[in-house]
Image (tube, rainbow, N blue to C red):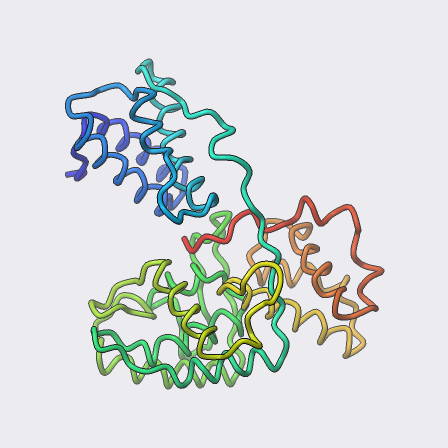
Amino acid sequence: MTGFVSELGVHVQVLLDVKHALGLPYVQSERHLRAFDALCARDYRGQSTLTREMAMSWVTARPGEHVNGQMRRITPVRQLAKHMSSVGVTAYVIPSGIPGRQIHYSPHIFSHEQLRALFDAADQIPASPFGGQRQLLIPAICRMIYCLGLRPGEAKNLHRNDVDLKRGTVSIRESKGHKDRIVFMSPDLHEYCRSYDAAISAYHPDRTAFFPNQWGNFYSPSTLNCWFHELLAAAGPAVVASTGSAPRPYDLRHAHVIENINRWVLAGRDPEALVAYLSLHLGHNNTEDTWYYFHLAADFHPDLRRLANTDIESTLLEASHDFR
C-alpha cells in the first residue's frame, strides 16, 4: 500500500524504490512528492501524464516561501518527470532555471557572550501547554548540535539507540552524503545527556526518537526553526545579527568548528595537520570541504589567514542548510 492517490502514483513509487535501492534516504523529497501527488489527484483527476500545466501549478511560489524552500519542492518533481521520460511516459520537465539561483547564507558566528545568552534562554524556556516536554528538549538538542558540531537534521533525527549513554558515543546514520559516523561526547555533555534521558524517559519510556514529540516520534524541521527563533527573541537583541543573515540552528555547528580551530591555534597545535580528523568528525566527504571553515576562523584569528586559500571559498560553501 503506497498511499498515493493520483494516476502518477505508480511512477512516484518506482522513483522512490530506485532512490532507496541506491541507499538514498530521500525523506524530504518523498514528502514533497506525496504533496504533489495529492495536488494532482485533486486538480488533475485521471491525468496519467505529467503536463506542463500540472508542473507549473506546483512551481508557483507560496506566500512567504523562500526561494531555497521553493527549489527543494521543485527538484523531486523535476526528477520524477525525468524518470517518467526515461521509461517512455510523456512528462514535462521543469526547466533548470526555475525558480532561480539558490541563495547561500553568510554564517552568523556567535561570540561567547551570545552563546551564553542563547543557552541561558534555552535553560529557562517554559513548558508547552500543548503537550511534549520542550523545556527538556530545547536545551538538550541545542547542546547536542553545538557541542558535537552536528547538522540540526542529524540531531533531530537521532534514534534513542543511536546515543550510547554507557560509552558516551553518538552514531550518525545516513547523513548528508549518506555517510555514517560516530562522534564522542565530552564528559560534561555525556553527563548532561544521561540526566536528560532519565528525565524525558519518565514521559516517554518507549520512545523511538532521542528527542521525541508528544507521541514519541520525531519533530519536523520547522519545529526546530520555531524553537530557535523563540530562543533568539528571549536572548535579546545582542544575539541577532544587525546585518547579513539572521542566526539559524545551523550556526551552532559553525560555532563548534570555529571554537575547535581557534583552540588548536591557541594551544600551539597545527590545524593543517588536524584537518583530516576534523573532516571525519563533521561528516564531510573529503577534507577540501572542511577548508571552508578556515575562512570563517581566519576572520577571528590572524594566524589562520595564511591557511585560507582565497580562491576556495566560492566552491566550498555548504550546499544546503535544510533539516532533513
Residue at figure coordinates x 78%, y 70% from the top left: 301
> Is the N terminus in the top left, top right, bottom left or bottom right quadrant?
top left
227 or 188, nearer to the observer: 227
Image quadrant assignment for residue 195: bottom left
Q: Where is residue 65 in the image (x, y as percent from the top left)?
A: 40, 47
Q: Compared to 198, does 218 lie above or below?
A: above
Image quadrant assignment for residue 122: bottom left
Residue at figure coordinates x 50%, y 59% from the top left: 181
Left or right of 136? Residue 175 is right
* Number of numbered callouts drawn: 0
Q: Compared to 243, does 16 lie above or below?
A: above
Residue at figure coordinates x 33%, y 19% from the top left: 91
Q: Where is residue 38 in the image (x, y as percent from the top left)?
A: 21, 37
Image quadrant assignment for residue 165: bottom left
Q: Position of residue 166 (x, y in %)?
A: 41, 79
Left or right of 190? Residue 91 is left
Residue at figure coordinates x 22%, y 75% from the top left: 204
